[in-house]
Image (tube, rainbow, N blue to C red):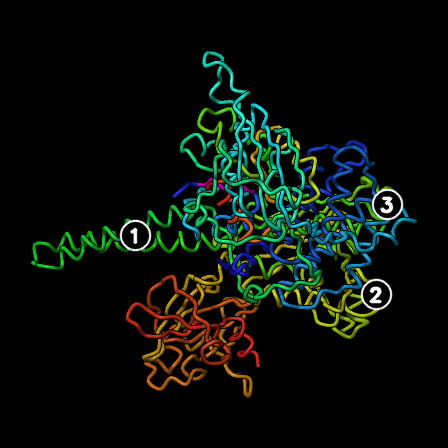
Amino acid sequence: MASILAVDDSASMRQMVSFTLKGAGYTVVEAVDGVDALNKAKTQKFDCVVTDVNMPNKDGITLIKDLRALPNYKFIPMLMLTTESGMDKKQAGKAAGATGWIVKPFNPDQLLKTIKKVLG
Amino acid sequence: MSIDMAQFHQVFFEESFEGLDIMETGLLNLDMGDVDAEDINTIFRAAHSIKGGSGTFGFTAVSDFTHVMETLLDEMRDGRRQVTQVAVDVLLGSVDCLKEMLTAIQDEQEVDVASVNEYKKALEVELNGEQANEATTTVEAVVEPTQLINSAGSGWSIAFSPHADLLKTGNDPVRMFRELAELGQLTSVVDFQGVPDFYDLDPEDCHLSWNLEIVGDIPSTDVDDIFDWVEDSCDLAIQALKQQNFPSVENETETTLVETNKQAVVEDTNPTANPIVDKPKSTKKEPSKPAAKGSSSIRVDTGKIDTLINMVGELVITQSMLSLVGEHFELNKLDQLKNGLSQLERHTRELQESVMNIRMLPISFVFSRFPRLVHDLSTKLDKKIELVMVGENTEVDKTVVELLSDPLVHLVRNSLDHGIEMPADRIAAGKPEMGTITLEAYHRGGNIVIEVRDDGKGLNKDVLKAKAIEKGLIDADANLTDKQAYELIFMAGFSTAEKLTDVSGRGVGMDVVRRNIQSLGGNIEIISELGKGSTIAIHLPLTLAILDGQSIAVGDERFIIPLGAIIESINIKESMVNRVAGKGETFRLRDEYLPIVRMHEIFNVKNAQATKLTEGLVVVVDGQGMRCGLFIDDLLGQQQVVIKSLEANYRKVEGVSGATILGDGSVALILDIPGLVRLSNQ
């Protein structure tokens, strides 16, 4: 089963995302911010990245940009978790190489559906 | 798939409260003249996280409220809005409001809507100015997902030509076609014209484009949603198919992309609206099953857990070594056995220490609320006060941390209100205009000491005395030392009444503070110098779960005396004893007469070995400054004991603070020394 890197500085969101995806059979590795995520992505190849946008140390958009520069992550789906108000964030995310977004608030079903969509 | 979201609520509440603390600290530290964008960003991020989490976990009221805060903070962050003291105060108020909301939700209480609306209005006034506030009372107009259903019911024709870099965003046309195929009957015609010569071909670029036709009664939003992510990375034209213009399915050049086997992956059947833009419709959606009430949890540094796991590992090795020795035991293995047992003892002790360590929290958990308190109160009192905190990382048991908060608040309030003088008075006294209150925590022996220091006017012995006489607490001719005079403020009835300010006088006197501290097994002392300031020091045991005890024997019974309470143990001679009719026995120790408490009488032990005072031992103990002698049979060993509550299992017993289980399995009562001293004085 596909492996997913779940990045969020909020423990409750991270747990929710991770629990949901694990429940669906995915292998999930959690990261607490962009720096942590980038380090983890370098040691293991993930099939998909789901990241929060607003995080300390390294935000989600910079993370996506940095990941896209790695040969292993050129074509990997990367989704951002963003609030509905962040239309400009979506544009910035797309420019950085994000595949798409999941709008907060979302529920586990919506998350799974989107993940299944990108992972086929 | 349904997931019980309630399981994440506890973590959400914890991180939200942490976030609120971060916001509060950040707001208090903002320097109006020179605002650092990163500081605002930190505050913004905390608000943002709470908003995202509360929305996801169904606390709509919280997310709506935070949304307004976030908007305000966002404008400050981008420099579109000046950071003013008024705005900061409004935000601080909002932090309080959010705390109340979250606490109410956590406790399954009703949220005080009126007060929330008041705060929200204040935020909106700050955000939009006075005139605009009426219009925006419902902040986030919930946009219902509009059902732009194409009722023609025929279908859509889509011209889709991706830009070369589409694949590099992780988007895959095949995936999108698969999704389309789920909506209706899909035909696709691929256009190869854009494919360059082999030598010019970049395999990472997308060179194809497609003409798609999808037939069925499909809402346009469903089609739009599929292309939502790639709008900017392709040329896209979507047109409604005309009824009569059904595509022929048997077109020669088409590729049918209905992959039935892949369809199984997506469980959901035709969604009528994109779930992702679907917003919660009910504004008052309560959590279906809120987090368990009163469940308390603790955050532990992973290093501590690692140590614990290491310790357990060691213990397992020792245990297996011992069982090996025990399997075929012969006397020549005695040394091995002894070694093993001493190892076991060491590991058990280390294990105990590291487990206790897990319960230890830095005192900053309590200290962190004080900057706000001092800020608010000094503004209110028109005093200039700087708060200095030292030793915030000093660790103390979680229970102590929780119970320490209220007494400390009281002490700091007192210092602010009664200790520090008004700026003008300070200048007149030759002191700096700005007063200082210092909160300091440090370890001393097995205790943690917390000091509240101020450089205010100090306690005036004569004023204290006069007030005590006026209240009838002491005789008019009482001769008091400084220390005794300071002790007056701990007397019940001393600090209440007369000057009921809303700052310190809340009807709770220092007597209650002292009682709270004593109930934690600690004590409180005052050092003060007139005109220079006062220091109030709280001494507390590091943990309430384990006690260093001295076990004693009275007949067949074993009791534990807290080691810290013992001053000395002596054999007394008949000549030292003094019997006062109706007042019991006392004995003279150097220059002092101390009451004797006969343990076998108080606890009704039948077979005590010593009944005559000269036969047994007298242990001199100190309970809150009062001393007495406990008459016992014998002293046994010293040991650490785990305190078990007697009240929880039986009921409160005078003179006993708890019980413990000894090595041989028997139960020993732990003596409540202050209680016994009180008993002896009755």
**Is B411 displayed left or right of B604 in the figure?**
right
Q: Characterize the local packing of mark 1: few (<14), some (14-19) or many (20 or more) Cα atoms within 10 angstroms.
A: few
Decide if residue B114 is in sight here. Answer: yes
Secondary structure beneath dot 2 equals loop
Q: Is residue B159 above or below residue B655?
A: above
**Camera-nearest label, 2 or 3:** 3
**Camera-nearest label, 1 or 3:** 3
Secondary structure beneath dot 1 equals helix
Disc 1 to disc 2, C-alpha distance? 57 Å
Chain letter, disc 1 residue: B
Q: Nearer the viewer, residue B619 or B534?
A: B534
Label 2 belongs to which residue?
B499
Q: Is residue A14 above or below residue A57?
A: below
Q: Are marks 2 and 3 in contact (CB under 8 Å)?
A: no
Q: Nearer the viewer, residue B556 or B363?
A: B363
Q: Characterize the local packing of mark 3: few (<14), some (14-19) or many (20 or more) Cα atoms within 10 angstroms.
A: few
Q: Nearer the viewer, residue B17 or A36?
A: A36
Q: Amino acid at mark 2?
A: Lys
Q: Position of residue B79 (x, y in %)?
A: 79, 32
Farthest residue to the right: give it: B131
Q: Amino acid at mark 3?
A: Asn
Disc 2 to disc 3, C-alpha distance? 42 Å
Residues at discs 1 and 2 both on one chain: yes
User: From which residue to which does the magenta span run?
Assistant: A4-8
Disc 1 to disc 3, C-alpha distance? 66 Å
Q: Position of residue B448 (x, y in %)?
A: 54, 53
Q: Amino acid at mark 1?
A: Arg
Mark with earlier residue (1, 2) = 1
Mark with earlier residue (2, 3) = 3
Label 1 belongs to which residue?
B346
Numbered circle sitting on residue B128: 3
Residue B368 within the magenta-colored segment of the rendering: no
